Amino acid sequence: MSRKLPPLNALKAFEASARLGSFVLAAAELNVSPSAISQHIKKLEDFYGRQLFIRHNNQLLLTDIARTVHAASSQMMNGLAELTEQLLGGPVRSNLIVSVLPSLGVRWLNRRLPEFLAVHPDVRVDLRLEEDPVDFFRNRIDVRICYGEHLYPEFVTVPFKRDRVTAMCQPGLLGRGRVDTESLHSLTDEMLIHVAWRAGFSSYPEWGAWFASQGMTVHPRRELGHTTDTSSVAIDLACGGLGVVLGQEILAETELASGKLVTPFSHWMPLQYAYSVVHAESNKRNRVVGEFVKWLSS
């Protein structure tokens, strides 16, 4: 009995379009014109008698039937790729485009990536440091690491780390007696380094809230200390001995481990939201994306 199969070139065009979220990007990957991709999709829609894509806010969204077709076609393409690797006797390189917040990228992810790549030597990472919001499909982003679970409601969002903050400073500030570890009152306004995230971002914990969480009513005058809008820069200022920062543990873990920074007080405060890894629904079956999300979550 002959098997009834969809037109395979059309299926290949569909899989690329669904994975990349764009006819243009699919055309570039398959080395054909965007109009050829459109014709292939039309042919596949005629074959199934169902609409496969819906355009919404410059995004290419999959219909219910398209999700089913994409799951099967993606599995088939991945299987063929693995078979090709086995038959040709060499690793097939997998590219992973990772978009991440600048502070987290330069102070945490770049230092941890070797762990992931040691386990997955076939993966090549394209690491992009950028602020939210990002355009997943236009920039071909596979995964985004952001702050909060609410920024990309149409995508799969997996929280993996809720960071916390506390007072951090150079050990020399303790040695000179400027910071008394037995007294919060020793933290004068002139010593404090403030982080003021830009408009549109979630609020960063302020010194007043940190004092209040320990039963003290203190309203530090920001103009008497140093201020920056970037968390990693604030930690750099503290490392330079310019004062005491309300620093994030995840961003300062290397400096804390080496003793370049110390925490004169034991009290910590959690950030309002967790860091999350985000990817398109169509990437659920992407092996490399799945492994990367699993690694972050662990």
Image (cartoon, helix red, strand yellow):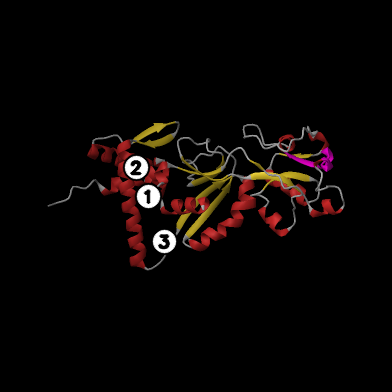
Q: Amino acid at mark 1?
A: Leu
Q: Is residue 105 visible?
A: yes
Q: Nearer the viewer, residue 220 or 241?
A: 220
Q: Quadrant of residue 78?
A: bottom left
User: Picture coordinates of residue 271 (x, y %)?
Assistant: 63, 40
Q: Quadrant of residue 55?
A: top left
Relative to 53, 116 lies left or right = right
Q: Earlier in the sequence, mark 1 or mark 2?
A: 1
Using a 10 Å C-alpha cutoff, classify the residue at mark 2 as few (fewer than 14 neighbours), some (14 to 19) or many (20 or more): many
Residue at mark 2 to residue at mark 3: CA–CA distance: 25 Å
Using a 10 Å C-alpha cutoff, classify the residue at mark 1 as few (fewer than 14 neighbours), some (14 to 19) or many (20 or more): some
- 1 vs 3, front mark: 3
Q: Quadrant of residue 132?
A: top right
Q: Earlier in the sequence, mark 2 or mark 3?
A: 2
Residue interval drawn in magenta: 185-195
Seen at 83% across and 52% down, the residue is 174
The residue where tag 3 is placed is 92
Q: Is residue 13 visible?
A: no
Q: Amino acid at mark 3?
A: Val
- Whether residue 72 is in magenta: the answer is no
Tag 1–tag 2 contact (CB < 8 Å): yes
Q: Amino acid at mark 2?
A: Ile
Q: Most extreme residue toward the bottom, as rendered?
A: 89
Q: Earlier in the sequence, mark 1 or mark 3?
A: 1
The residue where tag 2 is placed is 37
